[in-house]
Image (spheres, coloured by chain):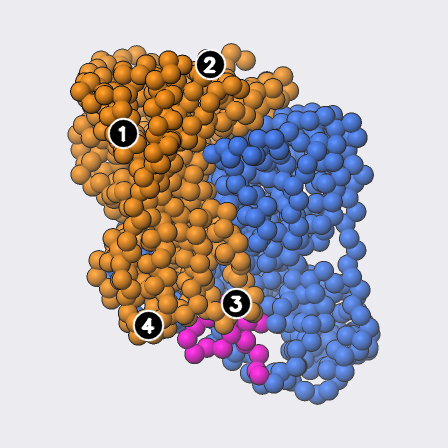
Chain colours: A blue, B orange
Amino acid sequence: MNGAESLIKTLVDSGVEVCFTNPGTSEMHFVAALDEVEGMRCVLCLFEGVVSGAAHGYAVMARKPASTLLHLGPGLGNALANVHNARKGHVPVVNIVGDHATYHLEYDAPLTSDIEAIAGPVSHWVYSSTAAEDIARDAAVAVQQAGHGQVATLILPADVSWGDNPNGAAAPAELPALTAVASDRIERAQAMLRSGKQTVIMIGGREVSAAQGEQLSRIAQASGARVLTETFPSRVRRGAGTAAIERLPYLAELAIEELKGTEQLILLGADAPVSFFAYPNVPSVLTPPDCEVLPLAGPDDDIDGALAALVKALQAGDIAPQLRPLQLPEAPVGALDANSAAQALAHHLPEDAIVVDEGITSGLACFPVTAGARPHDWLNLTGGSIGWGLPAAVGAAIAQPDRKVVCLEGDGSAMYTIQSLWTMAREQLDVTVVLFNNRKYSVLEVEFARTGARGGKPGPKAASSLAIGSPDMDFQAMASGMGVRATVATTAEEFSEQLADAMAHRGPCLIDARVPPLELGW
Amino acid sequence: MNGAESLIKTLVDSGVEVCFTNPGTSEMHFVAALDEVEGMRCVLCLFEGVVSGAAHGYAVMARKPASTLLHLGPGLGNALANVHNARKGHVPVVNIVGDHATYHLEYDAPLTSDIEAIAGPVSHWVYSSTAAEDIARDAAVAVQQAGHGQVATLILPADVSWGDNPNGAAAPAELPALTAVASDRIERAQAMLRSGKQTVIMIGGREVSAAQGEQLSRIAQASGARVLTETFPSRVRRGAGTAAIERLPYLAELAIEELKGTEQLILLGADAPVSFFAYPNVPSVLTPPDCEVLPLAGPDDDIDGALAALVKALQAGDIAPQLRPLQLPEAPVGALDANSAAQALAHHLPEDAIVVDEGITSGLACFPVTAGARPHDWLNLTGGSIGWGLPAAVGAAIAQPDRKVVCLEGDGSAMYTIQSLWTMAREQLDVTVVLFNNRKYSVLEVEFARTGARGGKPGPKAASSLAIGSPDMDFQAMASGMGVRATVATTAEEFSEQLADAMAHRGPCLIDARVPPLELGW
């Protein structure tokens, strides 16, 4: 068994059964080993940003890591933006980055780079294997490090891959257990909830489950606390029959308003809320200055255990959680815009769908109106780095082949990783892409105004830099060029019909929804 | 004048007049400043890999840096692969990477990352500005550092951008002069050339000019030395009327054969030749073990001066250089493959064209047959990181709007930065993309065989990982979706006609050339 074979066998034995790949020469022995070792599904992507985003979507929905296979430093660079998103979202990923043979590095060949240095800022753990007989053990450590929500990057020199490993596969990795929350923190949280002060509980981290929503509803009813999720939690269960929780608004101005008067903030899996960006004369910290903040549980802590302890202490176990009734809007008619599209989405979304939201300004309308839609999971962009949605939909569909994936995608954001469509076609994934085509970096028009640059109103060059409608992009043509069936919708009726059709049939498709950009009144 | 305005004015005053951009919120004051300061052309790209590759192509053809505008660490990550190529090719680039406001960094907002750490491995110089009053000076230093062939990355926090800079623009940067080659090295080279031993002169670095080719021809005739370029020099002048120089083969096995018996190697701008990748049982160093290697001049040294000194010492000034006659093959007929496509290219290539070569296996055929084509510049992928060709063509066309750019592109490599087509359409660039569509990562089939993995023959999973024809990609559809006129060629006659038409008309177009992959005889 060579190094690559022992590596793959160790990954598979540890439950890492999918590898999203974009290989090069230095990875050829890894690629060869896929035919020698049973059990690894290999998903080819045409660009490394698709690889890393797909690993993100997979891990969020499978609740375990996939692996990625990347080609040297530049391949990792191409993957970096979505690895960043995984790191920020506490999403487990095992990156395998091929490198030159150890003895070849000193010659500084054209593709030589400092892979460890590139990996460092986006990884919790980086290690470069040095010998074929160690690689299986190193792989097990990588899986363990990825654990529940970390990015582990294992660098695999070509000679470590092709060298003989007499040790064979290593013992499978054991995922680390969640850390129990210390009793003094739970007691402090109890005291805060009993204090009568204005209290907010904010939950986030890897996943906000239906059960957590119900427990939070009990706690809220028993204590009078308000419950929010962080702005962009990785995964939230919501819709009819869930205790759907509002989220903290994205805009700092609105978030500050939302948290106004809050005297106590209890954090579960979430960080203390700060502004996404800095703006002149807007504070970075969103809580009131005198608000007491208790980080009750981090993303790797036993949040369920902490919630159970609070419910028990508040004697709230018998309280019925407040669950959303099914509230389906009518199918929309008339003009197609973000609101009517959102209405159609809420109307047609099938039970147990997975919504991947990178709809940016147009996607904003979809969130509130689907609170009463059929129950579903909602995936968010956790690290703010655009180009995540289409790849994440690829990964989610591979993790959950029996569920419909709906990817809400902006035209601008789609173009960072448009190659994802090809993998959707190749793997015949059950993904419907709702492409909000408004021919603008609409969010940047909003942000331009918020930063106050040039009085908030772009001049001609700046306006041109935020407009992507010249030339107009035809996503139907691009999608069909990559093997994905696509339609164009220009009215609410067309969009609704096309969406209904997409929900009724399996397989990848794209709806190019021609919507107007946000109206800023310039 | 705010920081961003003083920065842009300093760049423009220093001759950096083009900015390839993909901005985000933290860059909005820079974007606003484009309307306040005269002279900066802003070229919007839909993905940062296009930004950095375009800056590469621009700098190679303009012989001076462009700037890039990138959004935080992830934006730089997306740009990284082509920044790597620039670094390896001695191509000057000034990257401006926006960051959060200095005071906002401590809050670790979602898009916070260690930009300096990400920039380090691909930059010669990295600096994060700390105050608006310093940013103009910092920009001048960045341009100076970029100098002739370096990557300078300047990090621009949002508050440095929007803060007031009472100092205004800084004094323009002065580009560093080339370093004269030390006389003892020149004397050693002279002695080597007079020794009667088997000697090779290998030239590379930033550019191999027509004048350098002529000088090398004189030296070769006077001394009996052979002349080669490195495998992938940034830019080479070649074709009819030039002393077109053969290049060192890519395949290590062939390069070793080419250099067999060489007793002395004189390097001008090039590094000592090493294998692109490591392979079991193939040496990393390509020169014979006992070959004396003299690094006569580095890429930042005065190569012209060194050549003049050698010509003088060899009394070769009056020798007529051996120039290629015009040798145009007939327009091809029959089956379309890499060879017939190459024949059509050589037949139709107009005078002073710029060829950007990322044709990979299909492009290999184009190089030898164009040695006698009308004179042209040939640009190579210097760092081996795929996804460079289309963006570099964008940049080259912006630098040289009156010359035809022909981009030889593989189907696999095109898909890393396919978004480039949109910028070609937006700017109506005079680029013809010859898209070799062979539905394979054909080079990886070759590399798989060379690494000897699984006896050199892929199993089913490996073979599937190297095949990109399922689904088949329709580049005509993709190009038209981004506003670029495209045609499909399935015979040599069709290809030749479409190429002739493309050469005769201005503006962007793409020919989807359906060619068979390399036949490996499996």
Q: Secondary structure at mark 4?
A: loop
Of tags 1 and 4, the one toward the viewer is: 1
In magenta, the rendered stretch is A273-289
Main secondary structure type of the part rendered in magenta: loop
Name which residue type carries label 4: Asn
Q: Which image quarter holds the N terminus of chain A?
A: top right
Q: Which image quarter holds the C terminus of chain A?
A: bottom left
Of tags 1 and 3, the one toward the viewer is: 1
Say which of A393 and B344 sits in front.
B344
Report, in whole angstroms, how far the alpha carbon at label 1 lies from the one at label 4.
Answer: 49 Å
Dot 3 and dot 2 within a common chain: yes
Identify the mark nearer the N-term, 1 or 3.
3
Mark number for residue A269? none
Residue position marked by numbered label 4 in the rendering: B165
Residue position marked by numbered label 1 in the rendering: B309
- Residue B64 in the image: state x and y as whole percent: 28, 46
Residue B209 vs residue B256: left or right?
Answer: left
Residue position marked by numbered label 2 in the rendering: B260
Report, in whole angstroms, how far the alpha carbon at label 1 lies from the one at label 3.
Answer: 54 Å
- Residue A266 in the image: state x and y as whole percent: 68, 75
Name which residue type carries label 3: Leu
Name which residue type carries label 2: Lys
Name which residue type carries label 1: Ala
- Viewer can see residue B285: yes
Identify the mark nearer the N-term, 1 or 4.
4
